[in-house]
Image: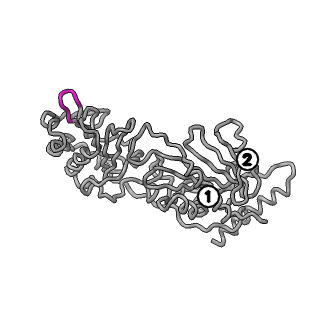
Amino acid sequence: MKSRRVILGAVVLGLLAACTDSVDMPPSPPQFPKWQPKQPRPADRDGQAVGAALAATDFCVLIDRVTYALRQPLDAALATTRPEVKHGRKRCALVRGDMDLLYVKDVDPAHAALRNDGTVVDLGGVKAYQVESRREGAVSGCAITVPVSFQHAVQFELGIQSRSKDCGTLRDFAAAGAAKLPRELVYPPDGQDSARVGACADWVSNSAGENCDPAVEAEVPATSELILAAGAADPNVECAVFHDAVKMAFGPDFAPIATPGSCHFVEPRHRLQIEAGATANGGAPGEWLADPNGTYKDHRQFSFGGSPGVTFRSKDDREFSVYVAPLGNLDSRGHVRLRLSPQRERGVEDWDRSKVVSEVDVAKAHAVMDFVLATHFRVAG
């Protein structure tokens, strides 16, 4: 750690020297190697073996008529199954006349990145993800996905003509169907069914997790210049700068994750995602205050822990940002930032819900920045 501080000190001294050596030319922006995730990724199951197992599966067998009859006896008594192949993938529908009541299908691997949008549920010892659809405040549908590899899954879904729209009916049905899948295909409730490690599973992102690590402890340097340089080189330092303040203001469920160029704090329900940064890279806070292209709204200037800063919102109110100049000049390159963005709640597909940053969360963001600046970026009196 001592050697890291010596290196960072040399970088800062070099930057300062560049300022004094040239009057006509502005100093070049600092250059740091791009940080990449370092923790090992879990291995996926053999894709050919999983594909062969799914190809051999009779998806209509996964439709347990007895279980469905307990919930919907009239539909089940008059229903038949219809096997089919759609877009090259097997599926089966439970139908009554010309009405599709529910489906069981082999999910296209392209949808694997969206899997963690669902709430994790336990289907009698089998891991699954549940998403409830809502429109105008009412439940309009339900889908339950059973992973069988990082890329493949079997999905149980209510049809639009089903009498019942709640997930209770589908969960019982899916549990009975999942019990008929080969044991080597399904995962236990706590099984590792994706390449996302630890809290990276709670990051709202379409990536497969290859660019995310759960944050590890890192020392926060003693001066503002060194903190910004360290943060530019390692997002774990950015996480360490904000760790205590975010936990105190937003709650213990928020866990830090490191990604190239920034730290995020994520929580299992997906209601709110926080991006945090303290870096010598990036623009000066004054650039966001000026906002020459009018990209944002509600630009305001504040003082945080004695340092000048700006706040602003996206035009749709779905993001609130704070950028602070810890060296005292809004036009100096480098900043400390916090960005809040509400997300669709995990397990709920609600197209009518307005996801905006609340005034309560705005107040918490101010408190976090005040604490961070007063704790790590003290302004000399």
Residue 375 visible to an observer of this rendering: yes
Looking at the rendered structure, the number of numbered marks drawn on it comes to 2
**Left or right of residue 84: residue 225:** right
Quarter of the image holding residue 364?
Answer: bottom right
- Does residue 132 show up magenta in the picture? no
Residue 69 screen position, x and y as percent: 15, 42
Q: Which mark is residue 367?
A: 1
Residue 170 screen position, x and y as percent: 25, 44
- Residue drawn 25% across the image and 40% down it: 104
Where's the N terminus, which quadrant? bottom right
Residue 323 screen position, x and y as percent: 66, 51
- Residue drawn 51% across the image and 47% down it: 342
Query: What is the secondary structure assignment of the residue under circle 2?
Result: helix
Q: Please, which residue is most extreme toward the top here? A: 98
- Residue drawn 59% across the image and 46% down it: 320
Up-down relation of residue 33 to residue 102 (above or below): below
Q: Amino acid at mark 1?
A: Ala
Q: Which residues are magenta?
A: 94-99
Q: Please, which residue is most extreme toward the left here? A: 77
Q: Which mark is residue 166?
A: none
Q: Amino acid at mark 2?
A: Gly
**Left or right of residue 5: residue 26:** right
Q: Which of disc 1 and disc 2 is earlier in sequence?
A: 2
Up-down relation of residue 43 to residue 355 (above or below): below
How would you rate the neighbour count of disc 1 (Cα within 10 Å): few for under 14, some for 14-19, many for 20 or more?
some
Mark 2 — residue?
286
- Which secondary structure dominates the residues rendered in magenta? strand
Residue toward you, 253 or 224:
253
- Residue drawn 54% across the image and 52% down it: 274
Residue toward you, 44 or 231:
231
Quote the CA–CA distance across marks 2 and 1.
21 Å
